[in-house]
Amino acid sequence: MLHKIFLFELNYWKKRPITFIFPLILFALSLIIFTAENISIGGEAVYRNSPFALTNLYWILFMLSPLLMNAIVCSGITRDYEYDMHQILYSMPISKFSLLMGRFLGGVFLILIMFFVVIIADLISPFMPWIVEDYLGPFHLGAHIRILLSLILPNVLILGSILYIVAALSKSTQYSLLAAMVFVALYLALVNLIGNLDNKDIPAFVDPLGGLAIMIQTEKWTLHQKNNFIFEFDYRLLINRLIWFTIAIIAWIFAFRFSGKSRLFSSKNKVKNQDSTSPKISQPLEIQLNPKTFNFKNALNTSYLEFLTMLKSPVFFTVLGLSAMMMIMELIGFVQNDTIEGFATSLSAYQFVAVALQPLKFGLIFLVGNLVWKAREANFSDVLDALPNQSSQTVLSQIFAVLWYIVSVLFILMLVAIAFQFINGYPSFDWDVYLVSLWFGNIIEMFGLAMLSMLFQVLLRSKFLGFLLSVCVVFFESFFFDWLEIDSNLVGFTATIPTAVYSEFYGFGPYLPLKLWFGLYWTLFFVLMAYIAYLFYPRGRELGLKYKLNQAFQRFSNSKPFGLTSLGLFLITLGWLVYQTFWVNPFISVKEEMDMQSYYEKNYKSYDSMPIPAVVHADYTMDLYPEDRRYKLVGKLTLVNFTDKPIDTLLIHHAPKFHFHYDSSIGRQVILDDKTPNPVEIIALNKTMQSKDTLIFAYDFEEYYHGIENNLENERLLPNGSFLDYSSFTPNFGYDVSLEIAQKSDRQKYNLSVKPDNFPALDSNCNIHCSYNYLGKNASWATISSKITTSADQIAVAPGALVSKEVKGDRATYVYELNQPSIFFFSILSGRYNVLKDSINGVVCEVYYTPNHHENIGEMMKSLKKSIAYYSEAFGPYQLPVARIIEFPQFSSFAQAFPGTMPYSESVGFTSNLPNSKYDINEIFHIVAHEMAHQWWAHQIVGAMMQGATLLSESLAEYSSLKLLQKEYGDDMTAKFLKDANMNYVFSRSMESKKESSLLEVDNQPYIHYQKGSIVLYGIQQLMGELKFNQVLKNLISTFAYKSAPYPNAYELYNRLISAAPDSLHTHIREGIQSIVVWQNDILSLETKKLAQGTYETKVKLELKKWSSDPKAKQTQSNKDNTIGQEKEAKIDDYFDIALYLKGDDKLRYGQMIHTQRFKFTQTNPEVTIVSNVKPDLVVLDPNFLHIHKDPELNKEKVK
Amino acid sequence: MHLSIQNLCKQYDNGIKANDNISLEIEKGMFGLLGPNGAGKSSLMRTIATLQQPDSGQIWFNDIDVLANPDAIRKQLGYLPQEFGVYPKVTAYQMLHHIAVLKGLTSELKPWVDFLLQRVNLYEHRHKNVAEFSGGMKQRFGIAQALIGSPNLIIVDEPTAGLDPTERNRFHNILSEIAEDKIVILSTHIVQDVIELSTQMAIIHQGKSIYHGHPNEAMSLLAGKIYQKKIARADLVTYQQNFQIISERMIGGALYINIYSDQSPDSEWTPINPNLEDVFFYHTQAFSNQSPAA
């Protein structure tokens, strides 16, 4: 019987459109993901059909299938009720088991079969004409089968079972759809949660889909593993699957045992029909029928009823609950983990509403579908459609109901966010700001999705197809428009309203008009969409296209004024915005930008080797009008030809679009080419610059904005808190390599030769690349004079000492002088600041902050002063008269070191809460210490323009700040810091888009020069000793500080370390800096016993694995034999510390140390014995990170 | 008050001709639309109720062109479809109130809703969910919703199908009360309904109107032309060949046939007074015999 029902089920679906449409969608998406550019599902360097990427692909596609399970599996049980077949069917001699199971398995089988189209897509992808060769690796049939059988099938079975039972018990696919939503949301919430957890077991077990276990397993994989291996059934996945299979089986048993036929298949209670003697009510005399059949008030009235029905449906609270849960989890994680970021503005917490929108989106799609089909499904539409109310009123009331729903969910979420922020110590409320964000941030977008969904439902006339298409929009919208390379905010399915950076410096400031205009545009667009939905809204029994068109036309003629007015308003807004964003402020799309980059490289690359003069002095007069977002600048650059070749031609770039004019006495313009990202001008000099000749390059420049932009182009020029980088108002001399296209696939698309690296290769013999430093060809040593006028209530800050300050009328004038030649790399800021002043070693220390951001300025000043004190002593004197921290608005979250000045974003420390305890990492202290260290590492010595340059700046700055942190807060703090660095490094290397370099040849990869750099340098320092190590750095400073070319390269540090270190450390230094080594260790056993003399002996049995990968590995295209990231076990000959601890404060990483001992290991399974005076509670291998570990938690073991 | 249907034709996409050139003139009172299942009654009623468009023909209610101006007729219309459902978890009172709003009633709604509920004997159950009503109660609820706003044209499509005799009587009483000063179109395949209620009637068969007039008139047309005889089942074929049989029926286990004949065939046949059922069978049989398909 079972197999007959199974076959019947398959037969039943054979003729349904879903059976073909869904596989078609899967196929199309797979093909796009395999072959389209700008798409990556496993990392750029990972083959798109590698086992790892395939797992991701199937996973993404699987996210669509809960909908399908509802349509196919769950409807297997509910359709009998829908079509009133159940009474006949359930009175037949079929066992409940064969009926339920047969249909269930039929549905499951069908869904599984559909996923096989991915294999076909993989097979034909290489033959697509547009395919770029190295997107795809070898075809892995085994991986497909493995994923289908071990990931897709179990999930369809498990999730399908649970949804099926929910559908069977509730007799409605509504509840099973809801249950599916809960499961997906649970998975998403868990993914968000685990990022910062040490022990990820519990979330991995709880995750109903098992994806988390796979994610945890593969998150540290190297490129090589991703390309060649598939996930295994590790203990997490195995336990997870066991748990959920058990739950699925229990669900089945429950369905059979505890709900006999009577309950599972019973019909509902009937009201007893009793004759009753009710009071006689006489007919009311008046009857008033509204003469107009369309009535706005009635629409509002009925919308209220529709909304109340929504409130009664489980969707409302499920969505609200899920959204609130997701948002609160994010907020808690934010407050607990990101010690660095606090609530910078009253809007900060509200912005977390964005992470909670997914449930709302699905809820909306679901509700809109139900709303449109409600009357028809209830078989009530015949009654309803014969009523005199107009369809417009019906549609309007439904739209209002949806709107009430959106507003109420978002408003409640907003209140939750505000409450959270309030509890966490940010007690100010700016309701106007919240409401603006609520409306323009989310309501329009959600309303748009709802209207789109309604239109789909009305036009497709199938609830399932409507759902499917809407869900596809949610999942793939951004993906789709990225793929089409459309960037205009006028194009989209749902609203694309420019995002605003809200800041306490200026509120919404210049963003507000953009938000208002695009908000209006999209609102009108969705009104039109709703209007079209109305025109085609089904009424009556006619289904034919001709009739529908006729009806639509008739409805249109009855509502011409409204339709034409909204169309007119929409077109006017569209026209206005097209005019503004394509003529007045033509924006450059990503594609156009790339076209320009390619054009630039092809036309001007030949100028790369042309000698260029260096700036030795710059003189600026800037008139800044912050409120108008405009400034005028007159610049005078003193250029010197330091090369030994004559210079008769200058190639310059300047910021695009704005007025730029140079003194024509310099020379004659040969070329002006504005088809490049920054317009190129080539000037034939009137007088050739011989070696050592000087030239004054005078120019004036003006930057200004008016009208509406597609996105705010310059988010640094602001009414308050402007932060202008020198490069935006200073021309750049010579060919600029940084304007070239960087990404490999993009270069292939434009037929540009593949550029494997960011920087030229490291060469131990200083070559031509040592004549420039890595900050750019123009970053020479220069002095700067600046005179800046700004609004009277603002302070302008430029590099160097303040010479004079004068306020006259509504203008203030500031004059600054930087007399110590410094790297030509600076910024000018202007804002309404308060200033905290102090000094150390004769250096003026200042913190400029916006008045209500005063919480942490004391901590910043402390770090500033301690940095100057320690670094001056350890590496050499601070050479500038001032050291400033200047707050800037949160359009970006960073702090940056310019000579003597440190612009510091409001969001990374000015308003965050300082750590609750002295045990927590103090990020504010650390950031200031790191940036101050750059005053030595980058601003005194700066690496040559080749690989490894950032070892000399970022890694050394990170080391310096870590050492300062240790001096201030102790070893426990650095251990925590190094553990974070360690984890960050092992996760980031897995995401590497090209290949992992060694530290020596670091190609500007942050995870190498920051995280690996700090561990390696700090480790060498631990082995060499602080004094000896710092002596090497001091020597480096004294040799190269403020010296012109040739600039030092990474070998200058490496060789000095080798010669200063004893021979026994050479291997460690070489492996740390020149190779890639990661350890995977375990403490196998611990034994502690008391010795006769009262001391304790601890026997430790270890397992050590040293993985090494070759930083020189190359990708060989022909045979697809890719060894990048391949790890091999290496010979062990290394120092390790083992430390014993007593249980201490929970906030310490380990506890109170009682003994530490250094060993040299040469075997994989060493055994050591440590004697201590006290019985230890905890044994830790490598507590202070001499090495990098795949899983540092395994280095800790409690004594039993 | 007058409803005029002229040359109405409606063919569905699957080729079925639901209405084939139907013309009817309907005056105040109860109009019975009699016809077998699938004759096109519901289709005709849905067309009058503006739920679908005919291919050709006209419908006029007084001076309203129903097809051109559906909104105007909807204001005077009460419609009870053959099958209808309601939203789950909504009470009778809420549902009626909702429909009253949609009908555009602007006067105080509560007295109206209460009055109608009381009139159809559901006042006691007004706070119970309609979805849980029994068949009879649901039909009474259906007529209540049709009566909101005192419509002048009421269309009820097979309202008594499946009701027990008590419910059916109760329903008939309500209908006949209403029909005093309005047009009520009642479609049914049960002859008895028409006899009990209608002042005018039409017989619809295979999409065509094959009789249109007063029930009594219809019966008098057949007076003296219907004969009955008890026969053995084995002889049925012979009789079918020789006589125009309009119906066969079992009475107390014996087979009786009614035939149409202008004069008495022989003495074994008993002349009987024609009832409406004979009229119905006479017309549908006669029509089938004429139609080329038969």
Image: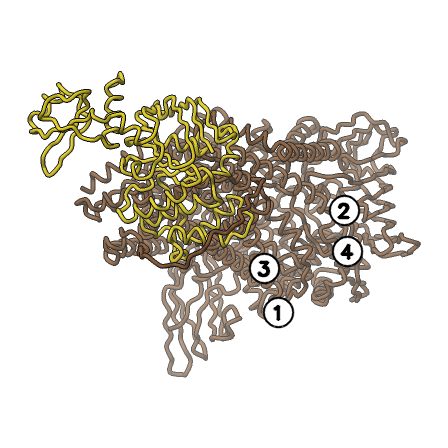
Q: Earlier in the sequence, mark 4 or mark 1?
A: 4
User: Are the two marked residues, 1 and 2, in contact with CB atoms closer than 8 angstroms?
Assistant: no
Relative horizontal placement of residue A525, taking residue A552 as reference (left or right): right
Name the residue beneath numbered marker 2: A717
SS type, badge 2: loop
Instruction: Locate residue A280, reporting x and y percent.
Output: 42, 57
Q: Earlier in the sequence, mark 1 or mark 2?
A: 2
Per the rendering, the mark at residue A900 is 4
Q: Residue furthest top?
A: B292
User: Which residue does the numbered mark 1 point to in the structure image?
Assistant: A969
Q: Quadrant of residue A1132?
A: bottom left
Percent position of residue A702, x then y = 83, 39
Badge 1 and badge 2 both on one subunit: yes
Q: Are marks 2 and 3 on the same chain?
A: yes
Q: Of the numbered discs in the image, which one, if any, rests on residue A417?
A: 3
Is A269 drawn above or below residue A629 in the view shown?
below
Sequence order check, earlier mark of 4 and 2:
2
Chain under callout 1: A
On what subunit does the disc labeled 3 rest? A
Q: Are marks 4 and 2 on the same chain?
A: yes
What hue represents chain B? yellow
Disc 2 and disc 3 in contact, CB within 8 angstroms: no
Of helix, strand and loop, which one carries label 1?
A: helix
- The spot of residue A798 in percent (x, y) is 81, 52
Q: CA distance from mark 4 to mark 3?
A: 39 Å
